[in-house]
Amino acid sequence: MAASALAFALYARVDWPWFVCGWVGLVPWLALLDRAPSLRAALSAGVLMCVAFVLGVFAWLPSAIENYTGVPWSVALLVVVLLAPVIEPQFIVFAVARHLASRSALGGNRAYAPLVGACAYVGTEWAWPKLFADTLGHGVYVSTLMRQAADLAGAHGLTFILIIANESALAIIRAVGPANRSSRIRQALAPAACVAVLVLSLLAYGAVRCRQLGDDNRSADRVTVGIVQADISQYDRMAAELGTFEAVRRILDIHFALSHDALGRGGLDLLVWPETVYPTTFGSPKSAEAPPSIARSVGSLPTSESRWYSGHTMPRRGTSSMRRCFSSRRGTVK
């Protein structure tokens, strides 16, 4: 279980070579589930995996709670541990469904259990209002070709593929156990072929889609976006020390400086600020347009207009390009 949590902590970096962890990271936990003697044991393994996954992938969460609420880190850690089954409930449902399927009449053939478990996992993520809306398929972003398949079944479809690949990897490892070499090869052939088909299908589809979209994009306008992140937290403490006006002024001044630096480099079509950059109006904006003084402070690109969107100052140029950028539902993610 700890090995699976570590694998996904590395996979969550969304970078090579940790991408491979998404294809094998569940294997240690799946092997543990196979040894669960009862439904209660499977349920316990699911709960423990929730905790291990949250602590591994969201290791920053206790510190974030401490920073924003002021509670001791140990209390924040306890809260995260207690809420782990709520944050990642799909592991519990997966463990229970897989255990029941493997011991039912339908699961007499163990090949059904991985499919039942994968469906339960993805279905739970779809139905449950997850705090971070995360799914294992998001890590496939690191592969330009493989991630294109998300336009067929979404990120959860990629998650389904990863779970089946992990189950196949476990089957390959289990198959090399018999002493008879010919038996080992025969038993490992089917799951190995399954992994190969999944990988090659993703790569082939991605290559086709990238070529199609590459041809379409040659005549399309490109949009260059600058993102401003000042790394400021604890607005309430700053307001208590400086007063509300001075705190807002300091926050805005920092964002103005970063914005001028980004605009000075040239070539930007869009400048994005965090939604909470103007804290006194967060949740109840005073107007749809930016105050003139703020718009003038930020400035704008030549031939562009600056508009205020719920705390964002967004210089824009080429309305049709903006619409394509934000309304496109199918396409290459670059």
Image: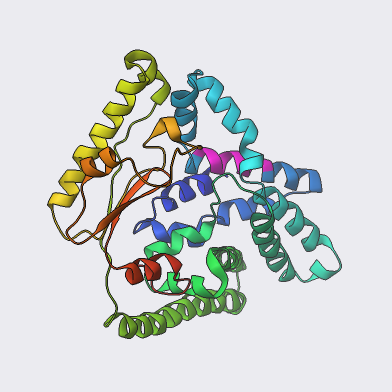
Image quarter of the N terminus: top right
Residue 50: say if magenta: yes
User: In which image quadrant can residue 181 be found?
Assistant: bottom right
Q: Main secondary structure of the magenta part?
A: helix
Q: Is residue 38 visible?
A: no
Question: Outermost residue toward the right?
Answer: 105
Residue found 46% across the figure and 39% down from its top = 285
In this view, the residue in front, 224 or 163, is 224
Quick check: 200 left or right of 186?
A: left
Q: Residue 167, percent across and down?
A: 61, 64
For the image, the number of numbered tags is 0
User: In which image quadrant can residue 43 be found?
Assistant: top right
Residue found 33% across the figure and 22% down from its top = 245
Q: Which residues are magenta?
A: 47-55
In this view, the residue in front, 316 or 328, is 316
Q: Residue 307, percent across and down?
A: 34, 52
